[in-house]
Amino acid sequence: MRVLSLALFLAISAGGSPALAADGVPEYADLLADCAASGNAACPGQQAALAPQWPKALSGDLPSLRNFAFCLADGCYGAFKVDPVRSCALRIVVAAIGERPVPDEDRGNFERDCGPLGAEDQQAAKIWARDMVRAIRRGG
C-alpha cells in the first residue's frame, strides 16, 4: 500500500512544465516482440489488434492503458516484449489519471505488477509513469 501511495504521489505531482524527451515514451513498435521467434500463431493478430489502441493509451484511455499493462506483463501470445517495469509504470498511470477512489481491480493489478519489483525497478517505473502522465496531459 505504501508503494501505491508513493507512486500515486510521484505520478500526480509530475505536473509542472512537461519536459518529456522524444524517447521518453516508446513507439508502439518498440513494445512488440518478434512473432517469428515467438512461434505463437496468435502473435501477429494480437499485434495488429492492439496497434490502434496505442494512440488511445497515449491520450489517456484507461481501457487501452490497462490492456497494454497486461500485455507487457503477460506477453499476449508472444506479441509483446515482456517488460515488468513498463507494465508497472502503466498501472501507476492508470491509478494516477483514473477514477477516484482507485478501483479495487486497479489497486490489485498494481499490487500484482509492481509489488514483485525491486526498489531500482520500482523507481524506473515511477519515472516512466511520470513521463507518460506528462505526455497524456500534453495531449500525446
Image (tube, rainbow, N blue to C red):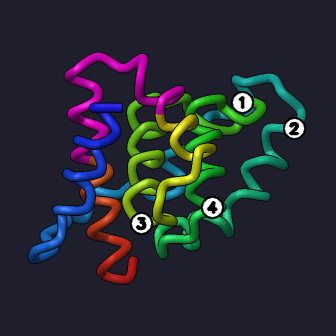
Earlier-in-chain disc, 2 versus 1? 2
Q: Residues within 10 Å of mark 4 (few under 14, many from 20)?
A: many
Name the residue beneath numbered marker 2: 42
Earlier-in-chain disc, 4 versus 1? 4
Q: Residue at x 87, y 37 (%)?
A: 42
Q: Answer with left or right where residue 118 lies relative to residue 79.
A: left
Name the residue beneath numbered marker 3: 97
Mark 1 secondary-structure assignment: loop
Tell me the quarter of the picture where residue 11 sits: bottom left
Q: Residue flagged by tag 3: what amino acid is it?
A: Ile
Residue 113 belongs to magenta span: yes
**Front one among 30 and 108:** 108
Distance of label 3 from label 2 (alpha carbons): 31 Å
Q: Over which residues does the magenta segment extend?
A: 111-127
Earlier-in-chain disc, 3 versus 2? 2
Which of the two discs, 4 and 1, sits closer to the camera? 4
Mark 2 secondary-structure assignment: loop
Name the residue beneath numbered marker 1: 78
> Is residue 23 at all visible to an observer of this figure?
no
